[in-house]
Image (spheres, helix red, strand yellow):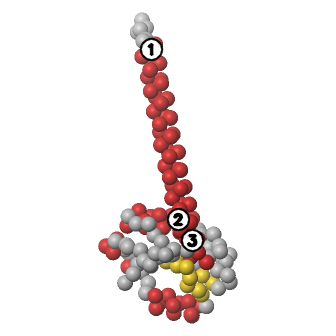
Amino acid sequence: MFSRTNIEKQLLKFRSKRVAEQNIMDEVQRIFSENEKRRDEIILSLTEKSNEIENHFDFDLLETEHIFHIEDIKKLCITYRLRFLDSHYFKGDFPEEAISEIRSLENKHNITLKNFKIIAPAKLLKLENADDPLLFAPMGN
């Protein structure tokens, strides 16, 4: 009628399932923790002065429509009365999408970006609208 159940075997099965679930939860927590740590490092690199001169991108992976010459940036700033300064002068909050894009570029190019520049209005570089600033990372010649 009923098949025999090995209680010890069932108990071991339940325990292994519980341990596997805990391992998954631990791994998820570790990934979230690493992600938060990396985001904090990016924010720190945006808000601190850097001695790096340029970033070493993989040119084959760059999107040319997002590369701008310094002279074009200067003309834009003069025309619209903007400032082009190191990002550590920026007093606003950096948008999450900017941090995500920096992280994406770092992963894609296998580098850590430094020495960011930002275009923003001169009003102490403090902005109301997060869409106003543009963030740049120097890449050399």
Find residue 135 and report its horizontal and vertical position in percent: 52, 76
Instruction: Report the amino acid beneath label 1.
Output: Glu
Q: Is residue 26 above or below residue 60?
A: above
Could you tell me if the residues under marks 3 and 1 are in contact, i.e. CB atoms within 8 Å? no
Could you tell me if the residues under marks 3 and 2 are in contact, i.e. CB atoms within 8 Å? no
Q: Which of the two marks, 1 or 2, is nearer to us in this view? A: 2
Q: Is residue 58 above or below residue 12?
A: below
**77 to the left or right of 141:** right
Instruction: Report the amino acid beneath label 2.
Output: Ile
Residue 48: numbered disc: 3
Choose between 76 and 50: the one closer to the eye: 50
Q: Which of the two marks, 3 or 2, is nearer to us in this view? A: 3
* Residue at x 38%, y 64% (from the top left corner): 110
Instruction: Report the amino acid beneath label 3.
Output: Glu
Few, some or many C-alpha atoms within 10 Å of disc 3 (few <14, some 14-19, many ≥20)? some
Mark 3 vs mark 2, CA separation in Å: 10 Å
Mark 3 vs mark 1, CA separation in Å: 59 Å
Residue 42: numbered disc: 2
> SS of the residue at dot 1?
helix
Comes first in the chain, label 3 or label 1: 1
Name the residue that disc number 1 marks: 8
Comes first in the chain, label 1 or label 2: 1
Find residue 42 and report its horizontal and vertical position in percent: 52, 65
